[in-house]
Each structure stands twice: as C-alpha cells, then as structure tokens.
Image (tube, helix red, strand yellow):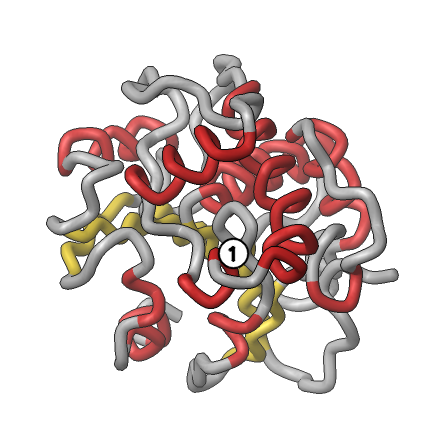
Amino acid sequence: MSFFGASTGTGSRLFCLPNAGGGTADFRRWVVAGAEVLPACLPGRETRLHERPYRSMPPLVEDLADDLPTDRPYALYGHSMGAWLAFELVRELRRRGARLPVRLIVAARHAPQVPTRTPPLGRLPQQAFLDGMQERYGAIPDVLLADPELLKAFLPALRADVVLLDDYRYTEEPALDVPIDVFHASDDPTVTRAEAEAWAVQTTAGFALHEVRGGHFFLREPGFDDAIAALL
C-alpha cells in the first residue's frame, strides 16, 4: 500500500508527514492553492491500523523514499516527528540522486543536531507513558483516554513513533541545497526559538523562521494552510 495514496492532480504536490501518533486528518482539511496536498498514512493507523508500525527511523525513511513520487515538482511538510522524518527523507533522496523538493517546511521540532532536552518516554510503563505524553504535548484526546478500547487501538502507533524519536541519532552530512522554512509557536513548550533557528545550518539555499500563534499542534489553527500556501 502506498504511503501517500493516489495523486489526482497534474500540478505540484505537497507531501505531509505527521506528528507522533498522527494520521492524515489534519492535512486533509488543508487547501493549498496551486498544490495537491498528499498526507502520508503510516502503518498502525487509519486504513493501515492492522499493519505493524515502524519503531526505527532509518527503515521508515528508506521505505518513504521508495514510495515518494518525484516525477513532478513537490515540497515536503513535516510536523513534530514529521519534521525529522522529512529532513532525513530529503537526505536519503539526495544519496540516491533523486529529484529533491523545491522546499522543505518543518514545524514544531527542534533542529536535528540540537540535543534533546527531555527524557525518553517510549519504553515507560503505560500509565507513565500516558502521563508523560500529556504533560509534554497534550497529545492524547480526552475521548481516547475515556475509552479503553479506542486507547488500545491508538497506543501501539503512538508508542512506536515515540520510540522512533527516542532512538533517533543525528549524523553529520553536508547541508542541503534545498530552502528550509521553519514554523515555531511561542506557546509550544517543546521547542525554543533558538532551537528552531538552529535549522538554518542545515541548508545552503535559504532559510526562514516563521513565528505563529498556538501550541504544539498549531497546524490545526484556522488559516495555517494559508501560511503554507504563501510559501509555494
């Protein structure tokens, strides 16, 4: 099954990679003039609920690179976990000599070379894991916490994604010849402005930091898709 589904347009594409535990719903609400929005559906959620989720970034990045259509101009957007996935995906595409995106847009995640300030969560016992995720991100909707069956279905993908983040290790490579835009929310407790600005060293083709309103999940704020559209 394709990560990104079937493309129905003929213009440029915006491929979107989600936060930990996230799916396609946030991106399907976006309207980006001039670009077809194609969110990735990762294993362990939505239509791929019964597939085993990835617990390590390298094989996921390699499989995303195998699946990504690069026959037309495209941009990449990654939110939180998706930011690191998108970054490593561009580096993998470069290693393969594939067509690179016209722009890399990342949000709600500190630059990959910056040490993580918070302790790992992914391998904690379930209640400690839930408490830690809520305290750090407010990531689990109340409707799931109140329904044991729904929570049971949701947790494997979320925990696998968090293990993937816990185990991620940045390795030095030359900066990308791709423009990087970073979105940072001042009310997001997980990323400081300095940590967001640190993405600048990862590109030789232009860098911009965009301050927005909202918390960690500011991609759900009304009009955020307009800010993305303005870059494309």
Q: Please name whichever residue, 13 or 134, is drawn nearer the observer in this view of the structure.
A: 134
Image point (27%, 44%), residue name: 207
Give amino acid for label 1.
Leu
Image point (46%, 25%), residue name: 121
Image point (52%, 46%), residue name: 20
Q: Quadrant of the N terminus?
A: bottom right
Can residue 102 be spotted in the picture?
A: no
7 versus 190 height, above or below: below
Q: Quadrant of the C terminus?
A: bottom left
Left or right: 163, with 181 as reference point? right
Residue indicated by mark 1: 76
Residue 73 is drawn in which quadrant? bottom right
- Name the secondary structure under disc 1: strand
Residue 212 is drawn in which quadrant? bottom left
Q: Please name whichever residue, 80 or 53, is drawn nearer the observer in this view of the structure.
A: 53
Where is residue 22? Give x, y as percent. 54, 56
Where is residue 228? Give x, y as percent. 35, 69
Residue 197 is drawn in which quadrant? top left
Where is residue 133? Give x, y as percent. 40, 39
97 versus 73 height, above or below: above
Q: Please name whichever residue, 2 or 125, is drawn nearer the observer in this view of the structure.
A: 125
Rate crowding at label 1 as few (under 14), some (14 to 19) or many (20 or more) other CA atoms within 10 Å: many
Image point (13%, 51%), residue name: 187
Can residue 82 be spotted in the picture?
A: yes
